[in-house]
Amino acid sequence: MPSERAGRTKILRVVLWMTGALLAFSAMAVSIRELAGPLSIFEILVFRSASGVLVLGLLALMRRDIRTELTLRHLPLHGLRNVIHFGATYSWSLALTLLPMATVFALEFTAPAWVALLAVLLLGERLTVSRAGAVLLGFIGVLVILRPGYESFRPAAFLVLSAALGFAIVAIITKKLTQSQTTIAILFWMNLIQLPLTLAGSDPGFLARLTPDMTLPIIAIGIAGLASHFCLTNAFRSGDAMIVVPLDFLRIPLIALVGATVYAEPLDAFVFIGAGIIIAGILWNLHAEARKHVEPTDAA
């Protein structure tokens, strides 16, 4: 049936874009951990923004159709999005140097509750049972992985909690921008607006501190910084914010495995139990979203 195929194709696109985003965000986290110490967070983020401006600027020079997309019409909304996003990214990046990566990613997923509320209030999206259930099961899975206690809620944890609220607001603004702006335009303004913010907080002579062993993490920062937001923006373009966000929960078990493998961070059975709960919620929501496109045809 055409409606069923269209529904499944839409969800498959969201899943594919989010897979790319998950891998890119994980690479970003590892790169930040590798560069932290010799470089400040501001200096690390310079490479992310500068590479984005360079790549997208070259594309704009080569293609007239891209240049026509870079209008000033929505610049105030881009400015609001990127000031909030920069603050949230700085807090998240700093927390990665102070807490285990799985803890950072788990605390970050207080954001879906804010996204769910803001999507209903600002975007007019429906809060269905499966969407609410996926978010709820995601939080339960996070709690199983994190097992909140005194150690988890060190002062650095509040950096992640503030970043989570910021990312939720950014997600809503991004969804709003996708209605009238291309992915390239959103990413170009993101990097162009945030580059001077990163430079303002950096040591003017920080490039002199670079060493050959930083080359790979710096390249990874540039690629992952652009790829993560390219994939995430296209995921929001392909489906409702409340379909995209529960899929993002998969970052937690993924980064827990990365932390255990690369940095010998503790990994126990609770990570996998929590991951199972998270995946169950995601599969429930994806099945319900696909069914929505079948039921009207069945009724007819």
Image: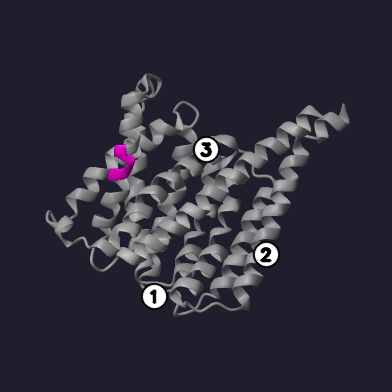
Q: Quadrant of residue 202?
A: bottom left
Mark 3 falls on what kind of element? helix
Foreground residue, 34 or 300? 34
Whole-number angstrom distance, CA of label 2 to CA of label 3 = 26 Å
Mark 2 falls on what kind of element? helix
Give the main secondary structure of the magenta stretch.
Answer: helix
Instruction: Classify mark 2: residues with Cα within 10 Å, few (<14), some (14-19) or many (20+).
Output: some
Q: At 37% across and 41% down in the image, what residue appears? A: 81
Quadrant occupied by the N terminus: top right
Which kind of residue does numbered mark 2 sit on?
Answer: Ile
Residue 116 makes an appearance in the image: no
**Label 2 vs 3, first from the N-terminus:** 3
The disc placed on residue 154 is: 1
Q: Check disc 3 and report the residue beneath it.
A: 234
Colour setting: one colour
Whole-number angstrom distance, CA of label 2 to CA of label 1 = 26 Å
Q: At 57% across and 69% down in the image, what residue appears? A: 143
The disc placed on residue 288 is: none
The magenta stretch spans residue 49: no
Q: Quadrant of residue 251?
A: bottom right
Q: Check disc 2 and report the residue beneath it.
A: 277
For this orientation, the residue located farthest to the front is: 212
Q: Give how far across and how far down residue 78 sits, in percent.
A: 35, 35
Instruction: Classify mark 3: residues with Cα within 10 Å, few (<14), some (14-19) or many (20+).
Output: many
Q: Seen in the image, is 203 located left or right of residue 24?
A: left
Quadrant occupied by the C terminus: top right
Q: At 60% across and 42% down in the image, what residue appears? A: 14
Number of numbered discs on residues: 3
Residue 134 makes an appearance in the image: yes
Q: Which residues are magenta?
A: 50-54
Query: 105 above or below 247?
Result: below
